Amino acid sequence: MTPAVGGTVVVVTRSEDADGPLSSELRHLGLPVLLWPAVGVEMAESGPLEAALASGESFGWMVFASRYAVAAVTQLMPAAPAGVRIAAVGQATAQVLRQRGWPVDLLPAEANAAALVEAFASQGNLTDVRVLFPASSRALPTIAAGLTQLGAQVVQVEAYRTESSNSLDVAECRAWIDRGGIGAVTFASPSAVDELEHALGKDDFDRLLAASPAVAIGPTTARALTDRGHTPVLADSASLHGLAQTTHRLLRLTDGER
């Protein structure tokens, strides 16, 4: 791919195919896309999750923080267990649950872990309520710790592993950084920030984001960037749609200043 006119090519760092949801929406908005999959996702060994799901009806709630957790659970349990309420962090995760026939009983207004904990706090007493949390290998403590503070008994089980991607062409990434033409870099998770910096090295990562604005899907991802000295643009809504729309608006504004 040759650099887009005006430097409007957008880097997608999440793990998805060329027809993935973020890439497709960006292209629909007229923006060419570079796929730089910084993270890879693999299902964890299923034994612990199977054991937890075997006692599914003893849980009052199941909490899903990503589509990967939904995939891991529904592969083992196609239908939601009777009497268990379902919480989702974000519209994208809720949509995948509904597509698979699962109800969504709790969905915070903002798609982040802290908002989910606040939503649970408004539900009433959680004392001794068992909560199953199928999580990433890199899950932050916000959900488990927050629900525990509310009195819940949280069973956190590793459902999938977030690791370095083996399909990122680092040499090609550095060539793009050298020649310019990148309009924005999108980040949909803190892990993508971590892994892209690790893959490129700090110097090239800093060069990239000095020349091209970072767009973060939510506050946790934004914090991973600010901790590294980069001020991101925060998506209007913590969703892939919000990430794409904000990137498009940012690049239109940038083009207007030229």
Image (tube, rainbow, N blue to C red):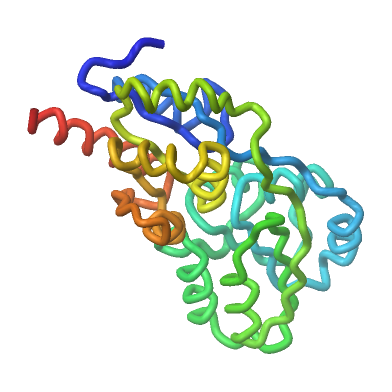
Residue for point 60% across, 63% down: 87
Residue for point 68% across, 82% down: 152
Across the whole image, how many numbered discs are drawn on residues?
0
Q: Residue 32 placed where, x, y %?
A: 36, 19
Q: Residue 101 placed where, x, y %?
A: 66, 45
Q: State the residue in front, 101 or 44.
A: 44
Q: Residue 102 placed where, x, y %?
A: 66, 50
Q: State the residue in front, 73 or 14.
A: 14
Please tell me in which quadrant of the rendered image residue 212 appears.
top left
Residue for point 60% across, 57% down: 65
In the rendered image, the quadrant that contains the C terminus is top left
Q: Residue 55 placed where, x, y %?
A: 88, 66
Q: In this view, does 165 lie above or below 87?
A: above
Please tell me in which quadrant of the rendered image residue 153 appears.
bottom right
Residue for point 46% across, 69% down: 115
Please tell me in which quadrant of the rendered image residue 203 appears.
top left
Residue lying furthest top in this view? 2
Can you see residue 53?
yes
In the image: residue 220, left or right of residue 254:
right
